[in-house]
Amino acid sequence: ITQLKGDYRVVALDLPGHGLSRAPDRWEASPAAYAALIERFVRQQGLETFVIAGESMGGWVAWEYALAHPSRVRGLILSDSSGWPDERPEAKAKAESGVVKALHNPIGRAILLPLDPRASLRNGLIASFENDKLVTDAMVDRYVDFYRAPGHRDLLTDLLVNWDTWPMATPERLAAIKVPTLILHGEKDQLVPLEHGRLFDQAIPDSRLIVYQGVGHIPPEEAAARSAADVKAFLGALKLTASGQDA
């Protein structure tokens, strides 16, 4: 955002369960539900056409939005996007772990959710970066605050336990995305394997994949200058007008 906002109008919003915005009561999270919420936001803000970008699960939301509202989307940017079935043994082991199974149960939730999340959030952040030194105490504190924001714990838990029930990426679904698409992916991503970035590139007709060597799950933070330069080049090639509605 810092490196793009001088040249483009950049609009960012907290998805429910993220940031410090209050999550709607009893809101059922899914990429499709997030995409519908974005469309409500777009209408309220009077936006017309734009490039939509998303990181990780935000990428899943972005490509779901592009499928649902193709007339609005001028371009699509996916950074280490999720959405493909994860067939890795370690992913299956995590999905079948005792903690995840307990979180499916109301009693298990009542026991686990009040526990201090600091250690698990730190471990998750360390897994997100190839350079562990980027995970500072201040970053962990910020994520703890996000997790403790009103309504976030239950909603984030729903995301953890329900993600494998959502309609996932397939070559047939993604073939319907006709806009230019930039796919960014960290070579060392432990959460979403590089192979998934390659699958997006194969499935989306007008796409380009850029792989960041020695970078983990979050290129916009771990390779900020390089990824911002690549995004600027992509946006420049789209020849967007000066209108704020195009950026």
Image (cartoon, helix red, strand yellow):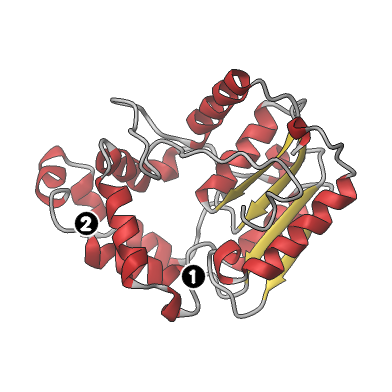
Q: Secondary structure at mark 1?
A: loop
**Quadrant in the rendering for residue 48:** top right
Vertical comparison of 122 with 116: above or below: below
Does 143 sit left or right of 208 as displayed?
A: left
**Quadrant in the rendering for residue 139:** bottom left
The residue under the point 48% across, 29% down is 33
Which residue is tagged 1?
A: 190
Q: Amino acid at mark 2?
A: Val
Kindly check if marks 2 and 1 are in contact, taking CB atoms under 8 A apart as contact: no
| Relative depth, front residue between 209 and 132 | 132
The residue under the point 31% across, 71% down is 137
Which residue is tagged 2?
A: 99
Q: Can you give x and y, in whole percent of width and height, for residue 166 in the image?
A: 48, 37
Indicate which disc, 2 or 1, sits on the residue closer to the N terminus: 2
The residue under the point 26% across, 60% down is 97
Q: Amino acid at mark 1?
A: Gln
The residue under the point 42% across, 80% down is 133
**Circle 2 Cα neighbour tier, 10 Å, few/some/many (<14 / 14–19 / ≥20):** few
Does 165 sit left or right of 174 as displayed?
A: left
Q: Can you give x and y, in whole percent of width and height, for residue 62 in the image?
A: 62, 40
Q: Residue furthest front?
A: 6
Distance between mark 2 and mark 1 Cα atoms: 20 Å
